[in-house]
Image: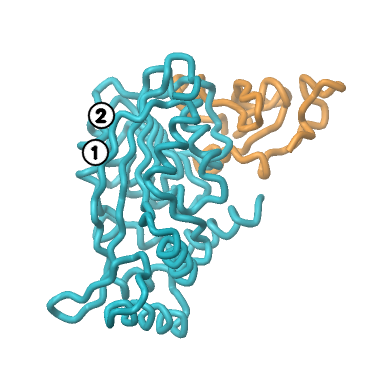
Chain colours: A orange, B cyan
Amino acid sequence: MAVQLDPQLLDILACPSDDHAALRPGTPDNPDADVLTCTSCGRQYPVTDGIPVLLLDEATEPTSGPTSGPDSHAADE
Amino acid sequence: MADHNEAIRAQFRIQAATFDDTGFAVAGLDWIVTGLEPSPTDMVLDVAAGAAHVGRALAPHVAHVSALDLTPEMLHQGQRLAVGAGLRNIAFLTGDAVALPWLDGQFDLTVCRLALHQVADPGAVVREMVRVTRPGGRIGVIDLTAVDDPAAAAEADRIERLRDPSHATTLTAQQIHDLLGRSGAEVTSVTAHDQPVEVEDWMERTRTEPVVRDVIRARFDEELRGGRPSGLRPFRDDTDALWLTHTWTMTVGRKTSDGSPA
């Protein structure tokens, strides 16, 4: 099921990592996934029962995200 | 997840069902809503919202409320109560108050009730609250505040931790004032409110061990017999029920135009 959040609310959400980059619904492979993906680090955050879980500890680290090169901060904690 | 966050989650999983719309959970809400001066166009964030008692109380007066908490059980309780009340302008999100999942400068009013005393790094919470508030927007911090006598304040923290091991440190009103200033918000009002708390109910909600309850009762009785202050101002009512007195302080600040320290 695709993420069902008010688009205005989605527009202001950000990754909880320090650079607070914007989030986009779905994953690069599946735009309908119940997930929010960081446009910078590629971390994926689950949406459970309609509630986004925006915790670094519960994010899925990207295997090959948009910035998985040496500049990526995906391994930051 | 940090150990302290896990302790908080464990504690509020126990307490979630007790956060209904009666008794202690709604204490002080009218006072808080009045003090925050909500406006119909406000975009509001309720940080460490629990079951979003403040967020739900504000929702009828504002454009929209986002409620964030670490404990899913508390959010589900809040969502259930919001649906029951017919509130449609509130969204619930799981997240950590020290790493807020929003872009900078989005909210007109960012509030946090009864959480700073619970977290390991209250300064980080306030910094994040100010960050996500728009320049000129308001930040409202409502929390227990400590007595000025450091020995009594430390004793109050010790008793609070006996009752709830996830209690961290109760700040003084001055410390909260300073945290806001350092984070880029100019404090515009500070109001205090005595909140009596029935001791047996207070210990029951956290399912404090019976032997620990005896220790706490004995400590308050010691003060009532003229012993050292516990920092929690106990008293007995007409029916001989034991109460303590929390001081709640509401500190409201306005974010400076460039977010520099006030």
Chain containing the residue with disc 1: B
Q: Residue furthest left?
A: B238
Q: Residue type at mark 1: give it.
A: Val
Q: Residue furthest right?
A: A70
- Circles 1 and 2: CB distance less than 8 Å? yes
Is residue B38 among the parts visible in the rendering? yes
Residue B20: % across, % down: 31, 57
Identity of the residue drawn at 37% across and 83% down: B218
The answer to whether B113 is drawn above or below residue B203 in the figure is above
Mark number displayed over residue B38: 2
Residue B141: % across, % down: 37, 40
Q: Residues within 10 Å of mark 1 (few under 14, many from 20)?
A: some
Earlier in the chain: of badge 1 and badge 2, it is 1
Identity of the residue drawn at 38% across and 36% down: B111
Q: Residue type at mark 2: give it.
A: Pro
Which quadrant would residue B230 be assigned to in this image?
Answer: bottom left
Is residue B86 among the parts visible in the rendering? no
Mark number displayed over residue B33: 1
The answer to whether B97 is drawn above or below residue B229 in the figure is above
Residue B120: % across, % down: 56, 50
Q: Residues within 10 Å of mark 2 (few under 14, many from 20)?
A: many
Mark number displayed over residue B66: none
- Along the horizontal axis of the image, is B171 left or right of A57? left
The answer to whether B178 is drawn above or below residue B114 in the figure is above
Of B99 and B183, nearer the camera is: B183
Residue A63: % across, % down: 82, 32
- Along the horizontal axis of the image, is A48 left or right of B74? right
Query: Do the residues indicated by labels 1 and 2 lie within the same chain of the protein?
Result: yes
